[in-house]
Amino acid sequence: MPAPAKEDTRIETRLLSTASRVHDAEVEPLLRRESQATLYRTISRISEQEPLPPDDTDIELAKTTTTTSGTSRSLYTTLSVLLLGVFISQADQSLVLATYGKVSSEFDDFDSGTWLISAYILAQCAAQPVYGKLSDIYGRKSCLQASYILFAIGTAGSGWGRSMGQVIASRAVQGAGGAGMISMVSIIITDLAPIHEVALLRSYVNVLQTTGRSCGGVIGGLLTQTLGWRWAFLVQLPPIILAIFLVQWQLHLTPKQDNQKRSKWDKLRRIDFVGAFFLVLTILSACLILDIAGQRAPWNSGLVRAMGAVAVLSGIAFVATASIVPEPIFPLRFLGQYAVVTNCAIIVLQMMVQMSLMVAVPIFFAATMRASSAEAGLYLIPAFAGNTLGGLIAGYYIKKTERFKPPTVVAPILAVSCMLLCYYTWSEPASGWMSLAILPGGFATGMVSSSAFVGLTAGVAEEDMAVAASAMYLFFNIGAIAAVSSGGAVFESSLRSSLRVLTSELSRTWSGRP
């Protein structure tokens, strides 16, 4: 009897050692589904017994192997349907840059012209975190369709508006729809694709986003000059209506069984309306401060202070509400999760660096090379190209290696190198080649937008994925708004300092004359 006992102990030790090695190998990369099957075969070999019947994992792996090509085709077909909406929403954001001057001129309200841009961004930020929870309750497809319909209503209102107020309000409706047209696509991709393929698929979305932003200004300028600014908005209606029908006919998602069993009233009761109100009010107030402080109003003005008080009070009310309700619109536990906090912080910082640079580039080349607005905009092409390449390369790397941390670490290094290149190489006389210095910055943004999203989704529970993804897109927008505000404040401060020095030198020169 002792000998068999020792043999059993030896086999058990080897099994535990093998299982430990398999587990350790899986800790750093993304979890591989083949690990159970590998462990099963090792156990069979060591125990020298007849192979056991294959478990559910082996059967699932066999099915996955035989249906991979069909699943991939279905996935890419679904993605192609979703990309039309992505392109339209991103083209609209840059299209309005070429039209808001004409709109202001027609209504003779130049002071409100920039609100055509701000209304969209503010509404987008306010609506962004709501989509995640609503998609968990009503389904991804329903929320995506709702975002398309909101965008279409806002587009029609912008094109047919009879006053500046109507157009601005319609732009806000557009922004509320545009918030879901991007985030819902990423959430759907994460639902359908294995996690190591999400980054590559999102890089394709990033390509369409970059293409839309690049083409929107050109399309808007041409339509405004030839047909009028109203057609710059109305021309978006046919493709967005087409996108609505394509999603209805071609997007087939399996609804959650829990949602199928619930009545409409039960679903409605799951929505935290009070928490959503205070969350939207908090975000709206904070974004308004970033948007108007230092540009439309001084930082110490009564309006900015009032907005700050509203943001603080509504934030406290949201925290109190989220602590009580069973299903808050944004769970407070996210604030303590490492994956959520770190990846959202990385996104905010990267977007602040990139957007502040994008604001400075046209100003620099317009001042040093006397470039027109259109010519100065061309010098942003290296950043757009870098963004596209960075997203594609990071997505391919993550798919092949199943590691997302290296791109996330490399991206900030590239962003810092971009700033250093601009600081040390941008001087007079300027040349077009200097614009290549912004290529690493765009590359870094493309990389981190892919890797940080995968890091976020890999670090949260499946039921929290949609809300976490919506939160990340909110921080994308907050980073952009903060960059424009802080970049404008720094530029204004630098300009005032330079003018003060120049005025002092001129005064000394004139005073020295006889």
Image: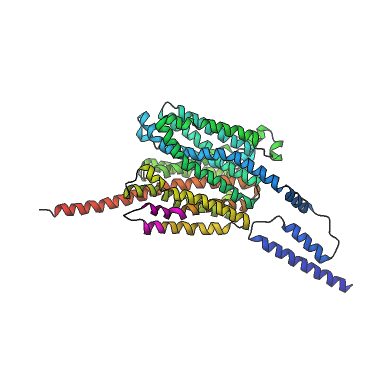
Residue 336 appears anywhere in the view: no
Q: Which range of residues does the magenta coloring cover?
A: 420-440
**Rendered location of residue 83, percent (x, y):** 57, 40
Q: Residue at x 84, y 65 (%)?
A: 48
**Rendered location of residue 458, percent (x, y):** 62, 53
Is 512 left, or right, of 413 in this rendering? left
Is 31 left, or right, of 437 in this rendering? right
The main secondary structure of the magenta stretch is helix
Residue 366 appears anywhere in the view: yes
Task: Please tell me whether residue 436 belongs to the stretch shown in magenta.
Answer: yes
**Which residue is the extreme one toward the bottom?**
2
**Rendered location of residue 111, percent (x, y):** 35, 35
Q: Residue at x 26, y 50 (%)?
A: 499
Is residue 406 or residue 117 the one in the foreground?
406
Task: Please tell me whether residue 308 belongs to the stretch shown in magenta.
Answer: no
Is residue 302 or residue 18 the one in the foreground?
18
- Please count the marks in the image: 0
Q: Residue at x 62, y 58 (%)?
A: 401
Tell me which colouring the rendered structure shows.
rainbow
Is 424 left, or right, of 14 in this rendering? left
**Rendered location of residue 213, percent (x, y):** 48, 42
Q: Residue at x 37, y 29 (%)?
A: 106
Q: Quadrant of the N terminus?
A: bottom right
